Structure formats: structure tokens, C-alpha cells
Image: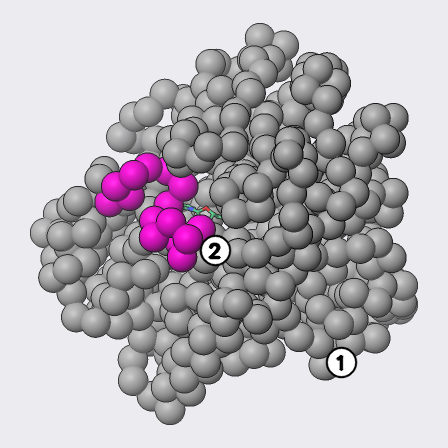
Amino acid sequence: MATAATTTTPPHVVFLPYAMTSHITPLVHIARLFAAHGGLRVTIITTPHNALLFQSSVDKERNISVQTLKFPSDQVGLPDGVENFAASPTLEIAGKIHYAFFVLLQKPMEQLIRHLSPQCIVSDMFFPWTVDLAEELGIPRFSFQTCSFFTHCVWQCLRQYAPHEKLASDSDEQSISIPGLPHEIKMKLSEIEDFFFEDNFTRKTYKAVREAELRSYGIIHNTCSELEPEYVEIYEKIRRVKGWHIGPTFLFINKLYNSNSIFSDDPWKNYRDCWNWLEDQEPNSVLFVCFGSSVRFSNDQLREIALALNAAKCPFILVAKEQDKANQLEEKDDNYGDWWQVDGFKELVVNNKRCFIIKGWAPQVLILEHGAIGGFMTHCGWNSILEALTMGIPLITWPLFAEQFYNQKLLELLGLAIGVGSDVWNSGFIVSSPVVPRGKIELAIERLMYDSEESRKIRANVKLMAEKVKSATEEGGSSHSHLIALIDEIKRCA
Ligand code: UDP
């Protein structure tokens, strides 16, 4: 990967990932790309247990070091090791982790950055204060954005035209069209985030994030033109600061290192049973069911999922997370609830024939890459979507919180998915929206996994999209060109 000539001492770039695996993973990918292929010197600042997620992958890199700061467990009243949203089964614990990162760690991070005297900061969007520090130090600050351009465009149109505020309060109409977009996008009011209706903590946080971005040198996005060309074009006009889209970041890493995960040298090492089970399945036959790093469904919802999977008859892998229970922080079998004991499903689990259950963390990218996978039921997290589309896997969409409903609309627009019918936004990863009944889930599975004109069309669309997304990271592709331009820009201005 050729970039502009380097000076004798490579510029030093400090990376600050946030406390969510879905933010850490792509940012660490970028750090590795900068170090290994951009000739930049990189320091990643995080807390010890978050560092464990990626330490082994960066140990191999010559120009990367990791500096850890003690997580203020005592101050927020959390046991040792609970530093990431994925390790946080309740919103209360997540709130404490956010407070620790957003507020308590600011001073120690600032001190460490001053001590390191870098020439550039690449900051997760959730550290808006880094823009003040960068200004004071006279160095560029780049903000890392984890969402699609489509989402940014919808947000901008909602702010600008406020169609959700224009519905007469006595109207029965509960859907709006989003004005200002090149396609007809309809949303139910129940699918839109609460901060568009009230001035709450999240609205204030996003306001701070946006203001910091407007004062930043630029924004780095984990997406590509090949996936959402019209929306890249629109957003580039409204963004008001420079930007580079270099996604899917994991694909660069996969290709450059021929390794599928940032977590270990032999990514299947701890998942041999899963691999063996997958090897026994027919190509494109297995439904992978995983709702990201942090989603917690109620026992009732999990029962409906179990009943639907039992009825739908296709083989599946189901990833189960610990539930929202008081005794959660201790690893126990009953933390996973008793939902799997419903009629029929229990026998499936015991016989281990048509299903494979993963409790805790699944090697998602590896699983999606396996030829046996034929569909993915997802909560529509942006990383999960990028991973599935790259692997050419069609989706069953079950958006739940954050910007996931917009991601679903994009997938629908592109003809890549079938929706399960969830239509109520949740304020966080603890799901309190109405239970989606087994019939709807079963229907969505059958529509995607059984052979029909509709499922063939979706599969064909996804295959085409996979080619396009892969080409983004090839020479001449949009993300490849942006990555080179970004590294050159950092070298020029550092
Ligand atoms: N992931 C994983 N194993 C799991 C759950 C999630 O590897 O058991 C990874 C997944 O591959 C993706 C990320 O965690 O890279 C989830 O990010 P996404 O944006 O999809 O959702 P979020 O976790 O932010 O809700």
C-alpha cells in the first residue's frame, strides 16, 4: 500500500477507543492499518480488560503499543474486570461504565496524552473533550464514527425538517416519510429514538459529539461508497468537515493478515466444537442467530425465539447472553434463564442435532464466513451488517435500539433482508419492546431460509452486494483510496 514519503521519525498517533466491543474492534483495525501499512507510530489508550480483547493481535505489530489506565471500579462500585458494555447485563452497570469512560477517565487520559506528546489524536466519537485537548496541543483530532452514511442522512433530515413533530397530536397516523432523501423512507414514530422527542441525556451527548466533530480535523467512517453511494454523496455535502470512509475495516485486516479475528492467533481455538458442528452441515443451510455484543432479551421473548426455531426446521446456531438478573456478574448456568426448556427446544439442545448453542461470546466473523451459513438473524448493529454483507449472507432483521431501525431501512431498500416485524425502539440493550410472537419469527425464517422466488432474489442481491463491498477494499476501491489519502493527510499535517 503506497503512501506519501515518510519523515525519519514516523508521526505518533494516539487512539482512544470507547468501552464497547463494536467501537473498539474497528478502531483497533484502523490502528493496525496505520502502523503496519501507513508507517505511523501508534499508541492505543484503554483500560486493562478492554486491552485484553485485542492485545494479542497488536503484539505482532512493530509500531503499536498499548497503554492502560486503571478502570475506576471502586469509584463506580463495580467488581474488577467489568469495563465493557458486553460484560454488562444491566443498564445500570452500562451507565456506570459510561460514566467512568465519559467523565472519570478524562483527566488520566488527558495526562497520559500530554505525556506522550503525539502528533495526532484518533478519538472515538464518545470522547468529545479530545477536541479541546487537540486544539490546545495544536494537533489534528480525527473523530471515529461507527454508523452508516444513511443513518447520518436520516438524522440530518429529522433535525432539519422535523417531520415527527409535524404530525397533529390528535392524528391516528403513526408513520412519517423522511423528507430530503433520494428514496421514499417511511418510519413509524415508535421506531425513532427518544432524543428526537425530548431533550434528554442522549440528546445532550450527541450534541456534544456533533459539536466536537465540527471543530475536528475530520471524521473517519466505517462504511464505503460501494454499499451506499447516494448517501455517501449526500452526507459528504452536509458533513461540513473533511471525512474518509474506510470500511469495512475488518476486511482490510482479514486480507492483509489472513486472520479472521483480532482476538487470537488461531481464531477457532476455543470454538472447535462449533467448527466441527458446522462442518457437518449442508452448504448455506444454517441460520446464525446473534444479536450483537450486548442485547438482553426477556425470558418471554427468548421462549418465543426458541419455539420459532424449533418450528422452522432449519439448522441454526443461537448465541445466548446472560440475562438481566441480579446475580449476573458471577458466571453461572442459570444466568442464561430457563427459556430453552420450552417444548421441543429442550430436546433439540440436548440432542445437539439441528442446533448449536453458544453461551457468551461467539466467533461471529468466522461463523459468517463458514460455507454452511445461509442466513443471519441480527439486531442490525452496523458491524454485524458489514460482516454479513461482506460474506454474502442474507439477513433477517430485528432492530432493537440505537440507530438499528435506520440500518434495517437501508437493508430493505437494497433488497437484502426480511424483517421480523419489530417496530418499537428500545432506549438501550435491555429489550422492553413488545414480545415478537413465534409466528412472526417463524415466518421470517421460512421466507429467508426456504427456497422461493423471494429468497432467491434476496440471495442474488446479497451476492452482488458482497462483490461490491469486497471491491471497496481492493486497489481502486473507495475505502482503499480513502485509507491511503487519510494516512497521507495525517503525515502531511502531523
Ligand atoms: N460479536 C461477536 N460475537 C458475539 C457478539 C458480537 O464477535 O457473540 C461481534 C460482531 O462480530 C460485531 C460486534 O461484536 O463485530 C457487534 O457489533 P454491532 O455493531 O453489530 O452491534 P453492537 O454490539 O454494537 O450492538
Residue closer to the observer: 436 or 226: 226
Q: Do we see residue 14 in this rendering?
A: yes
Rate crowding at label 1 as few (under 14), some (14 to 19) or many (20 or more) other CA atoms within 10 Å.
few
Q: CA distance from mark 2 to mark 1?
A: 30 Å
Mark 2 Cα-neighbour bin, 10 Å: few <14, some 14–19, many ≥20: many
Outermost residue toward the top?
74
Give the residue pinned by disc 1.
182
Spot occupied by residue 26 in the image (x, y as percentages of width and height): 54, 46
Q: Is residue 210 above or below residue 149?
A: above
Quarter of the view holding residue 333: top left
| In the rendered image, the vertical position of residue 417 relative to residue 288, given as above or below | below
Q: Is residue 396 above or below residue 198?
A: below
Percent of width and height locating residue 177: 77, 75
Which amino acid, by three-letter code, is at mark 1?
Pro
Please name the residue that numbered disc 2 is placed on. Answer: 252
Q: Residue at x 37, y 45 (%)?
A: 261
Judging depth in this view, the residue of 366 and 359 nearest the camera is 366
**Image spot of residue 281 (x, y percent):** 16, 65
- Secondary structure mostly seen in magenta is loop
The yes-or-no answer for disc 1 within 8 Å of ligand 1 is no
Q: Which residues are magenta?
A: 253-268
Left or right: residue 135 versus residue 12 is right
Question: Does the magenta run of residues contain 417?
Answer: no
> On the image, which quarter does residue 305 sit in?
bottom left
Select label 2 or label 1 by which is in front. 2
Q: Secondary structure at mark 1?
A: loop
